Image: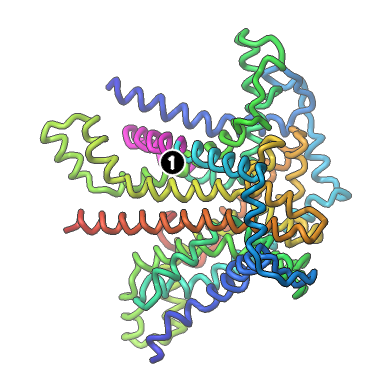
């Protein structure tokens, strides 16, 4: 009994350390004055949100563009990851181990090094400072997650269901849309969410390849954090987190409304 | 013939993106690091920039600082994460809290994690305010500077905030999915809880812990945002140093920058190789426990 109590306390300390800092930025985002050493704001206000909502600051337009960009990245990443994951999950072939490692590599190899290396080439082919240039580089840190998550799903799923459908006379298209995709649905939610998150929070890649022409929400948020403007930084962080949550919920809803799968979350 | 080629055809789109951006980015970087930068007419192949990098004290300081940050944060994250996973295992919680632990650190980006650390640890932050009210310090300046400091306390806090729940969820997943029979058998044979933890649970999770350690080590080693936002002016971590060298308007300086990038890449490729080794160990493990 006593031992369990100890672990309960440990668990709650961790939980507090996770949530308390977030609670502080929630407070800061509604703060007007909060001088040191007060433990609670002296006055509340909405100046930060007013600034963000003011059309002349473009923040909402940039938020919209960011959501659009990351959604495009999500679709492309999922689209090309499905066949790749199927190959890795269901087939045996030469070089499989190497290809798996290669696809995982962008998580481990610093994006800083890759982006600086490719920057000159992107400039020379005219992809630098363009929407599609940014989409293409965003695929690099996203693909490892989508391929890995979907590979796991294919491995668990196997191909017996697809074979049955084929034997019963379904053609390739029918098998894909009525058998493979519904079974894949929970994995699509996880992979899609992960890709969206990774793309939406990219700073360095967008900054370098977008060259200031393509500005995302992560980039507008950055200078506020850098300058230590707590109130503004907290407002933008809150909007960032809530937007991400909202998108994740919508992804889940949309996929589920098409395929009523079970409610589980691979990761 | 077609069936043999089929998996490769299915992999083509992904591999095309990876080779045209990722691999070619690294190759271009490598060529430039050798002094081959045709855009400005540099056409040599030499290792002199690497030599220059290794002779630079600033570089060595950065390398040391980067290794220190990654090592301390990853070791702490792995130990604390395993502890957290074990305490989740010991208490039954509702799924909601587990989901929260799962998702929050994934959703919050590195730049916001840096803000969290700044809010908590800066001299005007929450920690110093609490200490003031406890009567431990009397002025802001009594509080040690824990952000932009040479020990990287702020950086470590931000990484740990993101990594501990991640490690915990990975380890917890192993223990939850593991057969209860093993720990029950041990308990029946008279082992106490502590022995079950050290001799059953921990060894089973060890390969996973090792591979998670490598992943977070490599990630923090190559990440830019957190050390850029919270790091001291000197030493800087390697990715931050590389970026600052990159912004040098003198393009003949580029090979030097790329040499730093290549060293960064080489270290992370070594970590990837280690990760693969750990992964092979996991499958060997699983295989043995099944037979």
At x 71%, y 58%, the residue is A206
Residue A256 appears in the figure: no
Residue B73: where, in percent of width, then height?
51, 38
At x 43%, y 34%, the residue is B80
- B93 drawn magenta: yes
Q: Is residue B154 left or right of residue A15?
A: right
At x 73%, y 18%, the residue is A36
Badge 1 density bin: few <14, some 14–19, many ≥20, Cα 10 Å:
few
Element carrying mark 1: helix
Q: Is residue B55 above or below residue A172?
A: above
Q: Nearer the viewer, residue B36 or A204?
A: B36
The chain containing the residue under callout 1 comes to B
Q: Is residue A62 left or right of residue B66?
A: right
Residue B212 appears in the figure: yes
At x 64%, y 41%, the residue is B227
Q: What's drawn in magenta, residue-wise?
A: B76-100
Q: Which residue is mark 1?
A: B98
């Amino acid at each position: 009994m006593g031992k369990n109590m100890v672990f309960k306390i440990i668990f709650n300390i961790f939980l507090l350390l996770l949530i308390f800092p977030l609670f502080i930025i929630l407070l800061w985002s509604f703060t007007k004055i909060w001088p040191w050493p007060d433990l609670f704001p002296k006055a509340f206000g909405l100046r930060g949100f007013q600034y963000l909502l003011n059309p002349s600051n473009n923040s909402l337009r940039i938020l919209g563009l960011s959501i659009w960009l990351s959604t495009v990245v999500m679709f492309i990443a999922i689209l090309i990851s499905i066949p790749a994951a199927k190959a890795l999950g269901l087939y045996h072939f030469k070089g499989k181990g190497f290809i798996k490692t290669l696809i995982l590599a962008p998580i481990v190899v610093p994006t800083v090094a890759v982006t600086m290396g490719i920057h000159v080439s992107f400039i020379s082919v005219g992809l630098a400072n363009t929407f599609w240039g940014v989409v293409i580089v965003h695929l690099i840190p996203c693909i490892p997650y989508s391929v890995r998550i979907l590979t796991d799903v294919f491995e668990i799923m196997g191909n017996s269901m697809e074979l049955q459908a084929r034997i019963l006379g379904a053609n390739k298209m029918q098998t894909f849309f009525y058998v493979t995709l519904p079974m894949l649905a929970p994995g699509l939610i996880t992979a899609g969410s992960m890709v969206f998150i990774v793309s939406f929070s990219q700073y360095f890649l967008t900054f370098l390849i977008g060259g200031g022409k393509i500005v995302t929400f992560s980039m507008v948020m950055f200078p506020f954090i850098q300058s230590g403007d707590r109130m503004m930084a907290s407002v933008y962080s809150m909007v960032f987190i809530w937007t991400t949550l909202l998108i994740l919920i919508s992804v889940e809803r949309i996929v589920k409304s098409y395929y009523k799968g079970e409610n589980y979350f691979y990761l | 013939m077609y069936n043999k080629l089929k998996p490769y055809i299915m992999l083509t789109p992904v591999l095309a993106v990876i080779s045209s951006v990722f691999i070619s980015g690294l190759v271009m970087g490598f060529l430039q690091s050798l002094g081959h930068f045709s855009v400005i007419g540099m056409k040599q192949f030499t290792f002199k920039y690497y030599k220059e990098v290794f002779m630079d004290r600033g570089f060595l300081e950065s390398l040391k600082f980067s290794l220190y940050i990654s090592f301390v944060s990853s070791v702490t994250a792995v130990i604390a994460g395993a502890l957290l996973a074990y305490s989740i295992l010991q208490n039954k919680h509702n799924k909601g809290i587990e989901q929260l632990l799962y998702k929050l650190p994934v959703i919050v980006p590195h730049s916001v994690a840096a803000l969290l650390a700044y809010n908590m640890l800066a001299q005007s932050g929450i920690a110093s305010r609490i200490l003031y009210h406890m009567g431990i310090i009397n002025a802001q300046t009594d509080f040690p500077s824990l952000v932009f400091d040479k020990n990287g306390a702020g950086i470590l806090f931000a990484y740990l905030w993101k990594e501990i729940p991640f490690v915990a969820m990975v380890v917890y997943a192993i223990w939850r999915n593991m057969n209860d029979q093993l720990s029950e058998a041990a308990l029946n044979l008279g082992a106490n809880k502590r022995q079950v933890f050290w001799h059953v649970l921990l060894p089973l999770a060890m390969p996973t812990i090792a591979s998670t350690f490598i992943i977070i080590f490599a990630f923090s080693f190559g990440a830019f945002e957190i050390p850029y936002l919270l790091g001291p002016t000197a030493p800087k971590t390697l990715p931050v140093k590389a970026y600052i060298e990159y912004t040098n308007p003198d393009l003949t300086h580029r090979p030097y920058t790329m040499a730093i990038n290549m060293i960064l890449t080489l270290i992370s490729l070594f970590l990837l190789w280690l990760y693969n080794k750990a992964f092979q160990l996991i499958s060997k493990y699983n295989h043995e426990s099944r037979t």
